[in-house]
Image (cartoon, rainbow, N blue to C red):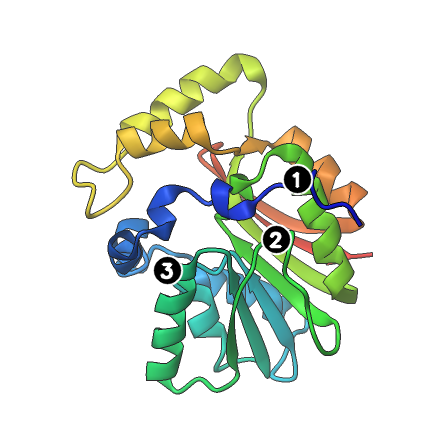
């Protein structure tokens, strides 16, 4: 099959995510060291849908692995997938240090990950789908549905704009104003502005039809500040 029309996900990953020095400080910048990563909420969403210690969970866009590292002691098999070699290497070292033999680290993207073994019981993706333009988001969601068992769970956390176009500018300004002062301690106004210019966060009223078209039913969703959303979806 001709693959010349497919994108190179590595080119969309953001150059900072390929930089080992940036990766080493990512947890602090993203707030995971301060407990702001909402990992426990994501784990509770999965167990609330009946997942137990027999489950297989795939973490797509795993990054430095805050979710995968917390999930491995709770589920039978966790596969952490990231397209960045630096992220994959960093997470692999952390998993080895923690002695998590059931945590597999795979270098791949949304569009290239090939699942092995029985279908997954859940897929989790946190703050990564926005790296793809909307056309490719749909393709990614279709692939996610394909690796889940019927009734499997998708937990999706990302930047999602819960606004109409006319209200977006004031919401964005409020978001920018809440940026951190110190870039080592959090995302700054400049970081947020760069995200808007170079990445592909989308509107709620575009994303939710994508989920439905890919075969998912949204069973729970929480929005924060009209900027962030956390979805729990079930594959029909």
Instruction: Looking at the image, tell me whether mark 3 or mark 1 is earlier in sequence order.
Output: 3
**Left-right relation of 73 to 109:** left
Q: Is residue 178 visible?
A: no
Q: Residue at x 27, y 50 (%)?
A: 29
Q: Is residue 71 left or right of residue 183?
A: right
Q: Quadrant of the C terminus?
A: bottom right
Q: Are marks 2 and 1 in contact (CB under 8 Å)?
A: yes
Q: For the point 50% across and 48% down, which residue is it?
A: 10
Write down the residue under mark 3.
86
Task: Label 2, secondary structure: give it.
Answer: loop
Q: Is residue 107 above or below residue 167?
A: below
| Farthest top residue in view | 166
> For residue 45, which quarter of the picture?
bottom right
Residue at mark 1:
136
Please give the name of the residue rendered at 76% of the width and 50% of the height, measured from the top-left corner.
217
Marks 3 and 2 close (CB-CB < 8 Å): no
Q: Are marks 3 and 1 in contact (CB under 8 Å)?
A: no
Q: Residue 227 versus residue 139: which sits nearer the camera?
A: 139
Task: Point out residue 191 in the picture as x, y percentages from the top left corner.
Answer: 31, 34
Instruction: Give whichever of discs 3 and 2 has the lower sequence position.
Output: 3
Q: Position of residue 76 (x, y in %)?
A: 59, 84
- Is 93 in front, or is 40? 93
Residue 139 is left or right of residue 61, and the answer is right
**Above or below, comparing residue 62 to residue 192 in the picture:** below
Label 2, on which residue?
Answer: 110
Does dot 3 land on a helix, a strand or a loop?
Answer: helix
Disc 3 to disc 2, C-alpha distance: 17 Å
Q: Nearer the viewer, mark 3 or mark 1?
A: 3
Q: Could one spot residue 145 in this view of the protein?
A: yes
């Amino acid at each position: 099959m001709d693959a010349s029309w497919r994108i190179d996900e590595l080119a969309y990953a953001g150059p900072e995510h390929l930089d080992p020095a940036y990766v080493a400080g990512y947890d602090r910048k993203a707030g995971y060291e301060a407990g702001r990563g909402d990992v426990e909420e994501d784990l509770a969403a999965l167990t609330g849908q009946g997942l137990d210690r027999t489950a297989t969970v795939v973490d797509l866009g795993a990054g430095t692995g805050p979710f995968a590292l917390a999930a491995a002691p709770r589920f039978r098999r966790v596969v952490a997938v990231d397209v960045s070699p630096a992220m994959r290497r960093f997470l692999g070292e952390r998993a080895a240090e923690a002695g998590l033999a059931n945590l597999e680290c795979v270098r791949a993207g949304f569009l290239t990950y090939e699942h092995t073994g029985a279908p997954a019981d859940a897929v989790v993706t946190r703050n990564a789908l926005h790296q793809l333009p909307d056309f490719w988001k749909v393709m990614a969601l279709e692939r996610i549905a394909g690796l889940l068992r019927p009734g499997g769970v998708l937990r999706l956390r990302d930047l999602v704009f819960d606004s109409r176009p006319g209200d977006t500018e004031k919401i964005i300004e409020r978001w920018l104003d809440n940026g951190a002062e110190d870039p080592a301690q959090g995302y700054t106004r400049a970081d947020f502005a760069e995200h808007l210019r170079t990445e592909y966060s989308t509107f709620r009223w575009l994303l939710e039809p994508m989920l439905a078209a890919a075969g998912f039913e949204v069973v729970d969703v929480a929005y924060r500040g009209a900027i962030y959303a956390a979805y729990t979806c079930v594959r029909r």
